[in-house]
Image (cartoon, rainbow, N blue to C red):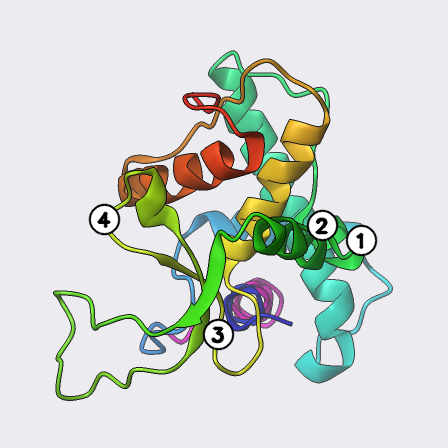
């Protein structure tokens, strides 16, 4: 299970301990999500799952992860509805991974010679002294106007979030829509070019993603 997802689940667990047992939330832990919205998630999970024993995190981590994701999706759908945005389908990253769609899209990009093994230099904000260049699987996003090529698979063999996003966009393309529309927050502005580059590569056309 991905580290960020585990951190999210653990954050919900500590909010449950706070709600149910009046234990203080460990705000000094930088890996946890401190948002107060998790208090509502915790209350909903506790009230709807009276059969779950919340004494031991390790015993319930898988069940709690599923419940926590469900709560997050309910909030996302509520916020989208308030903006007048309705979805006919929600596609989970889990289904993309379980259906081996990441591996399939990598093979597709390999056949088009859009991926290669290589190393990337440290980002400008990083301390170059501590940066270790490792061979990774990269997507040739610079072929499509991006400022650098992007990592699909890390040196340890795990896929990046970007790889899952590429697979998801291939899934959208295969459903034969004329245009693809992404709604991103302001903090994801730097993500736009790499995603649009991957869609250009996968679709063989420009400006399919809006």
Question: Callout 2: helix, strand or loop?
Answer: helix
Question: Callout 3: helix, strand or loop?
Answer: loop
- Depicted 20 relative to depicted 148: above or below: below
Question: Callout 1: helix, strand or loop?
Answer: loop
Q: Position of residue 173 (x, y in %)?
A: 64, 29
Using the numbered discs, state the Cα–Cα distance from disc 2 to disc 4 in whole angstroms.
Answer: 27 Å
Using the numbered discs, state the Cα–Cα distance from disc 1 to disc 2 in whole angstroms.
Answer: 5 Å
Q: Position of residue 185 (x, y in %)?
A: 35, 35
Q: Which residues are magenta?
A: 9-26
Circles 1 and 3, Cβ within 8 Å, touching? The answer is no
Return the disc, 4 or 3, that comes first in the chain's sequence: 4
Q: Is residue 49 or residue 151 the one in the foreground?
A: 151
The residue carrying pointer 3 sits among few (fewer than 14), some (14 to 19) or many (20 or more) residues within 10 Å by Cα, namely: some
Return the disc, 1 or 3, that comes first in the chain's sequence: 1
Query: Which residue carries the number 3 mark?
Result: 154
Using the numbered discs, state the Cα–Cα distance from disc 4 to disc 1 in whole angstroms.
Answer: 31 Å
Return the disc, 3 or 2, that comes first in the chain's sequence: 2
Q: Tell me the tag on residue 144.
A: none
Q: Tell me the tag on residue 99.
A: 1
Q: Tell me the tag on residue 96.
A: 2
Circles 1 and 2, Cβ within 8 Å, touching? The answer is yes
């Amino acid at each position: 299970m991905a580290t960020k997802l585990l951190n999210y689940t653990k954050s919900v667990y500590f909010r449950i301990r706070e709600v149910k047992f009046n234990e203080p939330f460990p705000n000094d832990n930088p890996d946890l999500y401190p948002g107060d919205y998790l208090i509502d998630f915790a209350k909903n999970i506790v009230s709807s799952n009276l059969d779950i024993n919340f004494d031991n995190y390790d015993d319930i981590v898988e069940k709690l992860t599923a419940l926590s994701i469900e709560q997050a999706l309910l909030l996302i759908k509520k916020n989208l509805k308030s903006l007048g945005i309705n979805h006919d389908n929600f596609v989970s990253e889990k289904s993309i991974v379980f259906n081996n769609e990441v591996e399939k899209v990598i093979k597709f990009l390999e056949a088009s010679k859009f991926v290669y093994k290589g190393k990337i230099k440290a980002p400008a904000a990083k301390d170059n002294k501590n940066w270790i260049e490792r061979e990774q699987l990269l997507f040739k996003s610079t072929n499509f106007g991006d400022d650098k090529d992007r990592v699909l698979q890390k040196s340890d063999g795990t896929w990046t979030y970007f790889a899952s996003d590429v697979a998801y966009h291939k899934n959208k393309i295969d459903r034969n829509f004329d245009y693809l529309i992404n709604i991103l927050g302001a903090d994801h502005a730097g993500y736009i070019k790499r995603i649009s580059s991957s869609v250009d590569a996968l679709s063989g056309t420009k400006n399919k993603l809006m």
